Amino acid sequence: MPSPPIPTKIVIATRESALAIWQANFIRHWLVELYPQSEISLLSMTTRGDQILDTTLSKIGGKGLFIKELEQSMSDGRADIAVHSMKDVPMNIPTGYVLAAIVKREDPRDAFISNQYTSLEVLPTGSVVGTSSLRRESQLRARFPHLQVQPLRGNVQTRLRKLDEGQYAAIILAAAGLKRLGLANRITTLLSPEQSLPAVGQGALGIECLSDKSDLVKLMQPLHHLETAQCVEAERAMSRELGGSCQVPLGGFAEITGKELHLRGFVASPDGSCMVSDQLSGKAETGATMGVHLARNLKAQGADEILAALEFTNG
């Protein structure tokens, strides 16, 4: 196949948060090296998910609120590609769009951050822990019912400021975001997947474009990381089969050792009182099929009842 022509200009759509700008610039620098003859620029914008900060994401439409405006900018020709945190990408990509590449994953774990305490285990009864995620909340409530879990919205710097002001005894954030922003020194301890199973796609970046831009998809292939893509595809297949969104407390995490992919997943009630979990291993290239099978195993263990109760509550 002949190489596609290099465009004279590539515009990257991104949210305006410091982390989103870092991620877009990370991709921009890579593209500048690959295609020095092309002008690579950013189109930054504030999304509805960034504007509404006084309500939890699960109550205002989910993480898809972070990417709709970016997709519109590609549709109307203002941008060519968009860079997303994969954990923010809805499980079903809208018709007319495609993930052109999934970039190598940063640390997928959750991070415990506190100015006073060394771990979740030593937090006194009644301590307030902040998190924006139903996934984290359900796991915290299941393991530490004596703690208070409170909503925490805003960008990374805002969340750290709220901790520093004493609004929380501790907060839980994604390690990847902290490391990308040069804030790894704020991490008190990293939580293993056994302690806090990561979100689907956590730590991975995705590059989205219009599905009819096959030349653009080809140009993005040097950024595509096969192992990360196989893991993320397995996680997303599990979540998709479960009807996953940020309104559903679920986690999914895949790792590849040698040629074998190991996938773990759980579904829980927000208060952590009901939780089902399971895991599967198989060939890395069968990750998407494994994700569907794992979801069905979870349903057989009672995930359907948890999901039905959530749907009734949210409805």
Image: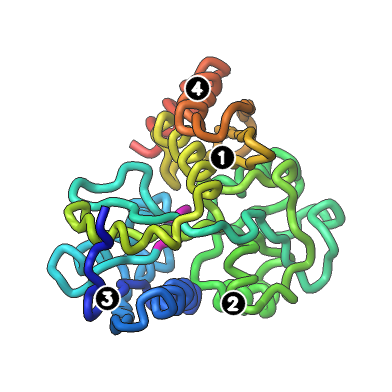
Q: Please, what is the dominant secondary structure of the magenta stretch? A: helix
Residue 244: % across, % down? 43, 38
**Residue at which label 4 appears:** 293
In terms of sequence position, does the residue under pointer 4 or pointer 1 come before the other?
1
Q: Quadrant of the C terminus?
A: top left
The foreground one among 122 and 147 is 122
**Is disc 2 placed on a helix, strand or loop?**
loop
Residue ID at (39%, 53%) = 89
Measured as percent of width and height from the top left, residue 206 is found at 42, 58
Residue 73: x, y in percent? 20, 69
Question: How far apart are the two marked residues, 2 and 1, measured between alpha carbons?
Answer: 24 Å
Q: CA distance from mark 4 to mark 1?
A: 13 Å
Inter-mark Cα distance, 2 to 4: 37 Å
The residue that label 1 is drawn on is: 252
- Mark 4 vs mark 1: give the one in front: 4
Give the Cα separation between the discs numbered 1 and 3: 33 Å
Mark 2 or 4, nearer chain start: 2
